Amino acid sequence: MIDDRRLKILTEGAKYDVSCSSSGSGRKNEGGIGNGYASGCCHSFTPDGRCISLLKILLSNDCVYNCRYCPNRLDLDIPRASATPEEIAELTIDFYKRNYIEGLFLSSAVEKNPDYTMERLVRTAKLLRTEYRFHGYIHIKGIPRADEGLIREAASYADRMSYNIELPSERSLRLLAPQKSKESLLLPMRKLADEKQIFREEKRKGHFLPAGQTTQMIVGASPETDGQIVRLTQSLYRAMGLKRVYYSSYVPVVHDSLLPELPAGQLREHRLYQADWLLRFYGFTAEEIAPEDENLPLDLDPKCAWALRNMQFFPVEVNRAPLEALLRVPGIGGRSAQKILEARKYTKLTFEHLKRMRVVLKRARHFITAGGKFYGAKNELAVRGLLSAGERNTNAMQLSLFSDPETALSALTGEL
């Protein structure tokens, strides 16, 4: 059994990885314990974004790599610890039976070499699946430069795998993570995507990454702009079929002359997540969201910023506009757009109807007409001022169960 000292070191070392928010797995329980389905893997979040329904732990924090931003890097004088695959498997089952967790997020520093570390990660997952017959959610963080056979074997036991890109450019990786390269991270992601496609086409029995792949990028540790980050995100979704790209604001947890002294700030991370939502659900392209050499504006969400740059497309008439046009209106989210399409089959919509549908009219009224009526500001400067003021008021307020329904629903669903 793993002792308290090692448990604290290994869980503390794992907390900076945020790419584990949800299951999305289709793994069925076939006579064992645990449930990897999305509904069976319920996740809670701490204020800094960590998922606390998974046992989130390292196999080891004893790293031979020297990534400058990492709290486990080689040249730091910190307590080191390692656990065996048997100890992690036993701990996972013990915590599951006590109803502490629904699954496991397993990562590791690169102990000795990539293959040695990957072998131990695979053995842990294999023990859980074959000896304990655990069908709950398992997320394995892959080790760059490990053997292809080990990577494929890990994918046969895991629900999800992630290779964290960490830094958005080859230049920054060379400077801050010299043992890694863009290709060493992208190659296993590409091979796993290809293997998953073949597995699906050949309709093989068993499981192969049923919950897909994710990755994470640190925002603010290196000089890349939001425009560059959004373009990289878009290419990862298109080429690798990733489920999610996660962003983590840089926090100076270790001192280094090559790193900024100040944290990046949560608002920039928030804007990137909003841009990510536009890419995945609203039909926007990276080129529309932000110029390559610029950051996203902090005073406006990226959908409002796009609308203000493209006022020639507005206002749109909600009783006639197609879905694609409605989704581009600030304040109209995916669910609201569908409600509008359905309701206007039976009646001519008014602003009162839209209010009842919980369209965020504080934003939307500047970009729409309803039955020919317009209640927005008369010029772009006035619209920008009102939207910026609304953003400041919303960002300054802590969301609660008793928040304004429009604000609460928008925050819950991610609708913009």
Image: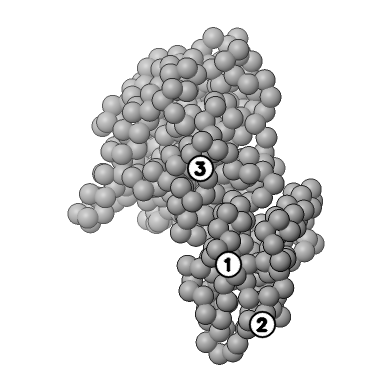
Q: Nearer the viewer, residue 77 or 89?
A: 77
Q: Is residue 77 left or right of residue 385?
A: left
Could you classify mark 1 by the number of other residues whose Cα lies within 10 Å: few (under 14), some (14-19), or many (20 or more)? some
Q: Is residue 14 above or below residue 160?
A: above
Is the C terminus in the top left, top right, bottom left or bottom right quadrant?
Answer: bottom right
> Residue 291 got which mark?
3
Q: Which residue is tagged 2?
A: 350
First of labels 3, 1 by sequence position: 3
Q: Is residue 365 left or right of residue 342?
A: right
The answer to whether marks 2 and 3 mark residues whose Cβ atoms lie closer than 8 Å is no
Could you tell me residue 406's position as x and y percent? 71, 65
Within 10 Å of disc 3 (Cα), the crowding (few <14, some 14-19, many 20+) is: some
Cα separation, mark 1 vs mark 2, equals 17 Å
**Three-letter amino acid code at the position of disc 2:** Thr
> Does dot 2 land on a helix, a strand or a loop?
loop
Residue extending farthest left: 202
Residue 314 tag number: 1
146 over 312 or under it: above or below: above
Residue 247 can be seen in this image: yes
**Type of amino acid at the residue the image marks with label 3:** Pro
Foreground mark, 1 or 2? 1
> Which residue lies at the image location 44% right of the left edge and 28% below the top edge?
169
Which structural element holds mark 3? loop
Q: Nearer the viewer, residue 95 or 231?
A: 231
Instruction: Indicate the quadrant containing the N terminus: top left, top right, bottom left or bottom right.
Output: top right
Q: Nearer the viewer, mark 2 or mark 3?
A: 3
- Residue at 60 percent across and 70 percent down: it is 315
